[in-house]
Image (cartoon, rainbow, N blue to C red):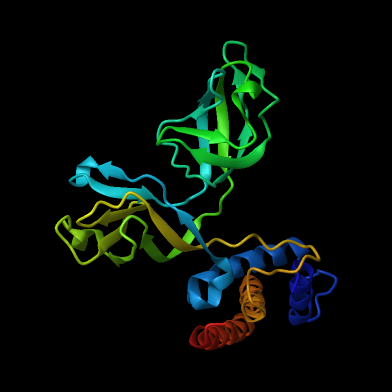
Amino acid sequence: MTGNEMITSLQFRLEDDTSNTNFSESQKLVALNDAQRQAVSMLSNDALVHLQTSRSMGGATADTDLGSLLYFSLPTGGILTGVTCEADDGRFTKTGHGLVTGDTVTLTTFEIVGGSVAFSAVNDLTSQVTRIDDNVFTVDGITAADITSDLDTGTVEQIQKSMTRVVSVYDDTNDRFVELTTIAAIGDHTAYNYGTKGALFNNRLYVSSSTATSDCTLVYITSPSDIVATNTEITYLSDSVQQVIVELAESLLWRQDNRQNRASAASANAVAMIQVINAQGV
């Protein structure tokens, strides 16, 4: 379906509200996106194959508060402020930027040092980055020749979607999958010769093994794009999942109208559909 088709489906479910009299189109879109988040949280990994993605985690960092246990920052999106760039090398600097090679970013608000003049050569550019180290990165398409003056006060917005759920982790250093456990159970596994232990804690992935893991690949489910009122086909969710979203959205709107019986019926339909989808993995 498209976003417009989902809205139309809702209109007919809501007592033929094709004129958007009882619920405006914006209310229907809010309900659809709230329902989408609910559906993703309730569906299995196999049912969300189109939302699964992978990324290299880059260099590991030692957490001195936890016995120098190595960790990788999980993908969250977000905004970096106060980014600087020197004219002599075209590299961008931000302490602990958290970016890895391949991340997509948009650059804004960069100004020439001392002049408070916007630097149009980089502002509003969207491109991928290459990680140099924890504090330095480059942006594809920008070379030292493009940076004619030192820059500061810049903002770098990470476009990558946030992580909803971890599917699996692969230890690239030791060529094996990571056995996920809890942060309390990971302990000191530097003498653990049978694999790599991993734990999720404080928006980080901690790893421990006899051979230190310097890089790993994270497979995870991303947060879906917002449903919008267009005629573009939604391809990141299966048709059956899209039907679930419409059912949940209908339930949410009936609850707003204090029609609890109608809301409960739509919600029950959605739950039954989710159980079938999770069982079949479609």
Q: Is residue 281 visible?
A: yes
The x and y percentages for residue 58 are 41, 47
Left or right of 235? Residue 16 is right
Instruction: Classify 161 as above or below 266.
Output: above
Q: Quadrant of residue 168?
A: bottom left
Q: Is residue 39 visible?
A: no
Q: Residue at x 14, y 58 (%)?
A: 191
- Which of the pair 80/167 is nearer the observer? 167
Instruction: Classify 160 as above or below 87.
Output: below
The quadrant of the picture occupied by the C terminus is bottom right
Q: Residue at x 79, y 63 (%)?
A: 230
The x and y percentages for residue 220 are 47, 63
- Which of the pair 215/112 is nearer the observer? 215
The x and y percentages for residue 130 are 52, 40
Instruction: Classify 248 as above or below 82.
Output: below
The x and y percentages for residue 15 are 77, 81
